[in-house]
Amino acid sequence: MSQTTPPTLTSVGIDIGTTTTQVIVSELTVNRSGIGAVTVDIGETTVVYRGAIHETPLVDRHTLDTDAVRELVESELEAAGYSASAIDSGAVIVTGESSYKENAEELVNHIATHTGEFVVAAAGPELEAVLAGKGSGAAAWATKSHETVLNVDVGGGTTNMCLFSGDDVVETRCLDVGGRLLRFDETGQVTHISEPAERLIEIRGLDIAVGTRPTDTERRRLATAMTELLFDTIEGPPLSSVTDSFTIGSSEYTGKTVDTVVFSGGVGRLISKREETNDESEFAFGDFGVILAAAIRQEIDRRSLRVRHPDEDIRATVVGVGTQTTSFSGATTHIDESLLPLRNLPVVEGSTITADHDYATIVSELQGCFEQGCELYELDETSPFVLSLPSISPLDYGRIKALARALGDVYEQYFTSECPRIVLTRQNCGKALGQQLHSASNANTPLVVVDEVVASDGDYLDIGEALGSGQTVPVVVKSLAFGS
């Protein structure tokens, strides 16, 4: 019997960072989990093209040069030998200080629209931390070794850490520490200081300002101060009050012991490759990266810290972006394939459906969700969106039938019969719920019910064309949380 060749997807990763912009292209093999399996996953991942590392084009300190970035991406795809139409999945992610630029969202939305069906616009330090950890190999090492591995991605504007334990992401830890927070000319004169660096300079009482040439001692004192913040975060709670003030997001970290640390990112590359750093002038890159890397390396040397060399360093985030963004539904879906592909659909998160919820309660809960979604996204009666159902308990025929009846009635109350009903469930019940909802709805109403995918309020969803037997679809959950 001949074996069927597994389908493949072409994925592009585009990382527009504080300092650099990079593009990679990967080929992803799609595997089923076994004979009769109801889920699929990414099997083999091969990076087929690593683009050059470009300096991120800026019009000024507050504005990305959208035309230059677009041309850069187009030229990299051309060099890789791929057209935009050949791209199946992937992400554009604006990271570090670049996510705060005034036109960041406009830029990635433009690139996402013109670079393949499933390119996702995403930003935010938490997502960046996870992607960098997957791209650096830290996640794979944690799974293989059953260790707790902390990936520390030290970039231009921020340091993003992700703690992996076995197969699980435990938490992310993010800091306003990076090599591009200060910039210098070739003579060592300061040309720019970002706000976090200004605060730290003031806290430490350092004589560093734009237009000055700080002494070697002053530069090293600042690098040491940044390094202390970084290692305080690596060690975990309790954090000092100063570290807490430079923390992005929550600082309520787990006390889980870290077995191994992996350093990635642009500064991480300088930490790992000593021979290159030692030959570089402190101002070779026009920023604070070489000085910061030296201070971090000295701190590593004086500690009993187990450090593993990354598979990818400066390209860790973009490799993670290119190879880890597409997930798949289960194989028990109910799909009107004529609707596919779907792009940029806002997600409205529903309430958990429990045994205590009778039909009237379910209707009331759904009405509240729909009203909130209509207000949040300014939906009208013809606007398609994704209803994400966190949990249905108990997951039995009677509960699914009651939920489908309530869904049919509430959809009819708020939306026209021509407006597609697109429902997402975390549990493996898409086909059963879809069949019941089809019976409870107008026969001509388009319907897509996808299971085993998680999405929340504020996310956007892409659903691709069905693979194989038509029961499984690629899904990308997108977060457009710029500057958060």
Image: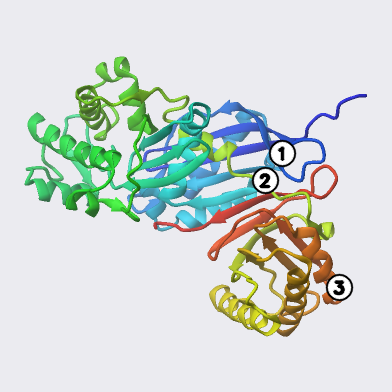
* Observer able to see residue 59: no
The reply to whether the C-beta atoms of the residues labelled 2 and 3 are less than 8 Å apart is no
The reply to whether the C-beta atoms of the residues labelled 2 and 1 are less than 8 Å apart is yes
**Of the residues under marks 2 and 1, which one precedes in the sequence?**
1
Quadrant position of residue 310: top left
Q: Secondary structure at mark 2?
A: loop
Q: Which mark is residue 164?
A: none
Q: Secondary structure at mark 1?
A: helix
| Residue 113 at x, y percent in the picture | 63, 52
The residue under label 2 is 116
Query: What is the count of numbered marks?
Result: 3
Instruction: Give me the C-alpha separation between circle 2 and circle 3.
Output: 35 Å
Q: Amino acid at mark 2?
A: Gly
Residue at horizontal 40 percent and vertical 46 percent from the top: 172
The residue under label 3 is 439
Q: Which mark is residue 86?
A: 1
**Of the residues under marks 3 and 1, which one precedes in the sequence?**
1
Along the line of sight, which residue is nearer the eye, 114 or 257? 257
Q: How would you rate the neighbour count of disc 3 (Cα within 10 Å): few for under 14, some for 14-19, many for 20 or more?
A: some
Residue at horizontal 34 percent and vertical 55 percent from the top: 250
Along the line of sight, which residue is nearer the eye, 124 or 334? 334
| Residue 394 at x, y percent in the picture | 68, 66
Q: Quadrant of the N terminus?
A: top right
Q: Amino acid at mark 3?
A: Ser
Q: Which of pointers 3 and 1 indicates the residue nearer the eye?
A: 3
